[in-house]
């Protein structure tokens, strides 16, 4: 039986001045490489990047990860370890994460069934 809810984690990011495109490249090359492995293993449903396209505000990008259950990261933490260990950091533009931005905060939300991405019955 399918889960009645699943966790969606929103991670708010703030790019270093003038570095929003660099932050996006870094996240796609590193976080999303690991997230793709998590999707293929059935740990995540999806992941995505959204940004404001602007420098102002307390944050200017958000990464959204949808887990297959209501426990979120806590439910997959043990299985995440090998994914994380296998990943080798990629530095697009020669820049590390602290050079391109920082995490402002993360929030876990519950998405209730029926899920918007569920195939039609």
Image (cartoon, rainbow, N blue to C red):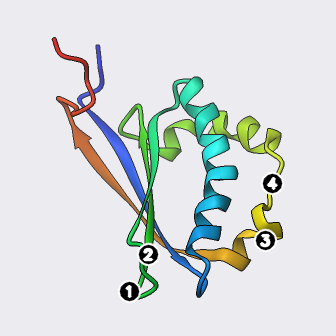
CB under 8 Å between discs 1 and 2: yes
Label disc, if present, on residue 95 of the rendered structure:
3
Is disc 3 placed on a helix, strand or loop?
loop
Judge left or right: residue 84 versus residue 31.
Answer: right
CB under 8 Å between discs 1 and 4: no
Residue 23 percent across, percent down from the top left? 61, 68
Q: CA distance from mark 1 to mark 4?
A: 28 Å
- The C terminus, quarter of image: top left
Residue 44 percent across, percent down from the top left? 49, 34
Residue 120 percent across, percent down from the top left? 18, 16
Is disc 2 placed on a helix, strand or loop?
loop
Pick whichever of labels 3 and 2 is earlier in the sequence: 2
| CA neighbours of label 1 inside 10 A, class few (<14), some (14 to 19), many (20+) | few
Judge left or right: residue 40 versus residue 54.
Answer: right
Is disc 4 placed on a helix, strand or loop?
loop
Q: CA distance from mark 3 to mark 1?
A: 23 Å
| CA neighbours of label 4 inside 10 A, class few (<14), some (14 to 19), many (20+) | some
Label disc, if present, on residue 89 of the rendered structure:
4
Q: Which residue is mark 1?
A: 57
Determine whether 94 is above or below 29 in the image: below
């Amino acid at each position: 039986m399918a889960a009645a809810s699943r966790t969606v984690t929103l991670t708010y990011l703030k790019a270093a001045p003038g570095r929003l495109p660099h932050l996006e490249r870094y996240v796609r090359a590193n976080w999303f490489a690991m997230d793709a492995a998590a999707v293929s293993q059935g740990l995540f449903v999806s992941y995505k990047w959204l940004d404001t396209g602007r420098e102002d505000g307390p944050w200017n990008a958000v990464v959204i990860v949808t887990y297959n259950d209501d426990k979120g990261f806590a439910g997959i933490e043990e299985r995440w370890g090998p994914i994380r260990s296998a990943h080798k950091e990629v530095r697009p533009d020669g820049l590390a994460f602290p050079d391109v931005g920082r995490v402002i905060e993360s929030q876990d939300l519950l998405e209730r069934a029926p899920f918007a991405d569920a195939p039609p019955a």
